[in-house]
Image (cartoon, grey):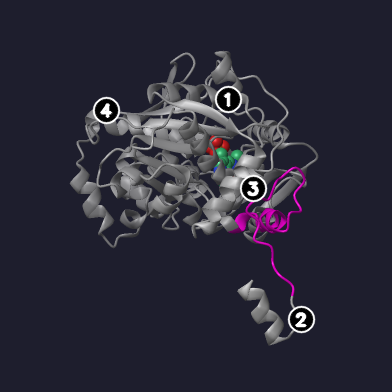
């Protein structure tokens, strides 16, 4: 086997195909690849991008030797792909100029098949589920994970069970889980309660757990970083900025960057900035105090990252430190203000994604990031995931939010002169 599992806490190793998510000591697990088994070049991945083979065209499986090295024969029998990835890396210099970062790029992960970066982890996670012969998968979710898991499970005829916090997920996401046919259970509790319940259920019922505590989810999400680097012709940006909730995504991107660097595919590492909502900031609190992450009760308008007890915190901190990174926090007002700017730039994203730009604005102001640096901000989810919050913002109907950039709809009688007056004003 070309990979094994290793505990983040005590380094205990397990065979790569052991069906476990944690070490006996309780620590989470990494997939450790054997670097001697491949010697790949950047040209090799560039050629794959031009190929018409479905696995090569996926923005995850194009990098399969770095993700799930089971070999093409095996993979071709179990891969579940929707051609995920291949998301745009937008030059965002106009928005960048507005916020004082002219060399800004935005990688829009909301352009994945189900509208979020979760598809990258779900293609790898569901593929592993099939390889292991599982018939059911489950997750707890603030919405996007469940939407993605439900879709990928449906594509391969796998049963799907979803735990969501009742009344606290955006309708765009809930509707996807229902539409794709997942057994959807609304928990009378928050995401952290749902997370704890789903781990028990999976252990008792032999269901494959597809939260990011599953190390193969992390492997797929590494491809966000691989694609950023490939999109930039294998040049490394100074910074990658992204939101943090359950902390799987920053773990994944950092792990991927370190692996590219170890294999000589990049010649330096980017720095990383992880942005949390101030009302859901356990990582920020740990980062600024130097203590371990302590669970908290979370509250933020960015429901995707409303998480108080992130499962991947240990891996996350390790990756941020290895990339000389920083963690900061932003208020809901800052998130919504940045969102209005991202949306009005013609790109658009859901609230949690816009914590990226809100955090970037803060780090530029504090001088942590400088205007001469090349920055890639990750927009994690699609604008249409949470339309209620958009309409609420533009009609100044959100409690505690300023709506300073509101673009309220105008009312007019069915009369052309009245309408002419309106659009001239
Ligand atoms: N952005 C969006 C749009 C998300 O949906 C999430 C997580 C994050 C950022 C944070 O990523 O958890 O890896 O730090 N959503 C999860 C879910 C928790 O259930 O959909 P993370």
What percent of the width, then of the height, locates residue 253?
41, 36
Q: How many marks?
A: 4
Determine whether the residue tagged by mark 1 lies in a helix, strand or loop. Answer: helix
Indicate yes or no whether the magenta region holds residue 289: no
Q: Decide if residue 167 is in sight here.
A: yes
Confirm if mark 3 falls within 8 A of ligand 1: yes
Residue at mark 3: 143
Say which of marks 1 and 3 sits in front: 1
Choose the circle earlier in sequence order: 1 or 4. Answer: 4
Q: Residue at x 66, y 47 (%)?
A: 161
Main secondary structure found in the magenta portion: loop
Left or right relative to 155: residue 389: right
Residue at mark 1: 283
Q: Residue at x 47, y 50 (%)?
A: 109
Distance from label 1 to label 4 (Cα)?
27 Å
Q: Which residues are magenta?
A: 384-411
Residue at mark 2: 413
Q: Are marks 2 and 4 in contact (CB under 8 Å)?
A: no
Distance from label 3 to label 2 (Cα)?
39 Å
Residue at mark 4: 262
What percent of the width, then of the height, locates residue 83?
41, 57
Distance from label 1 to label 2 (Cα)?
52 Å
């Amino acid at each position: 086997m070309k990979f094994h599992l290793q505990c983040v806490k005590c380094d205990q190793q397990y065979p790569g195909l052991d069906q476990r998510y944690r070490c006996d000591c309780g620590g989470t697990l990494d997939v450790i690849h054997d670097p001697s088994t491949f010697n790949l070049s950047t040209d090799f991945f560039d050629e794959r991008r031009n190929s018409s083979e479905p696995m090569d065209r996926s923005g995850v499986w194009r990098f399969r030797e770095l993700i799930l090295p089971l070999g093409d024969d095996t993979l071709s029998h179990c891969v579940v792909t929707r051609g995920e990835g291949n998301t745009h890396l937008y030059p965002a210099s106009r928005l960048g100029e507005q916020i004082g970062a002219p060399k800004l790029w935005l990688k829009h992960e909301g352009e994945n098949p189900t509208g979020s970066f979760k598809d990258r982890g779900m293609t790898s996670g569901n593929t592993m589920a099939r390889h292991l012969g599982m018939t059911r998968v489950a997750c707890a979710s603030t919405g996007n994970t469940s939407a993605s898991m439900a879709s990928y499970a449906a594509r391969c005829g796998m049963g799907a069970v979803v735990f969501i916090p009742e009344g606290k997920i955006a309708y765009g996401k809930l509707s996807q889980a229902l539409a794709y046919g997942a057994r959807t259970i609304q928990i009378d509790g928050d995401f952290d309660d749902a997370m704890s319940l789903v781990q028990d259920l999976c252990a008792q019922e032999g269901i494959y757990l597809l939260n990011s505590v599953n190390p193969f989810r992390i492997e797929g999400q590494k491809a966000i970083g691989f694609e950023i680097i490939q999109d930039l012709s294998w040049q490394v940006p100074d910074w990658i900025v992204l939101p943090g909730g359950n902390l799987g995504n920053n773990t994944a991107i950092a792990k991927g960057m370190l692996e590219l660097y170890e294999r000589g595919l990049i010649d330096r590492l980017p720095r990383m900035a992880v942005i949390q909502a101030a009302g859901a900031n356990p990582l920020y609190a740990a980062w600024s105090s130097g203590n371990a992450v302590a669970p908290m009760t979370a509250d933020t308008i960015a429901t995707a990252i409303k998480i108080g007890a992130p499962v991947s915190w240990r891996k996350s901190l390790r990756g941020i430190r290895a990339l000389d990174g920083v963690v900061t926090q932003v208020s809901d007002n800052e998130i919504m203000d940045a969102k209005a700017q991202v949306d009005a730039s013609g790109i658009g994203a859901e609230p949690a994604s816009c914590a990226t730009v809100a955090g970037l604005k803060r780090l530029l102001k504090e001088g942590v990031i400088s205007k001469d640096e090349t920055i890639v901000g990750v927009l994690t989810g699609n604008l249409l995931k949470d339309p209620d919050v958009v309409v609420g913002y533009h009609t100044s109907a959100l409690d505690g939010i300023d709506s300073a950039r509101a673009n309220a709809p105008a009312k007019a009688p069915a009369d052309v002169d009245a309408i002419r007056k309106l659009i001239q004003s």
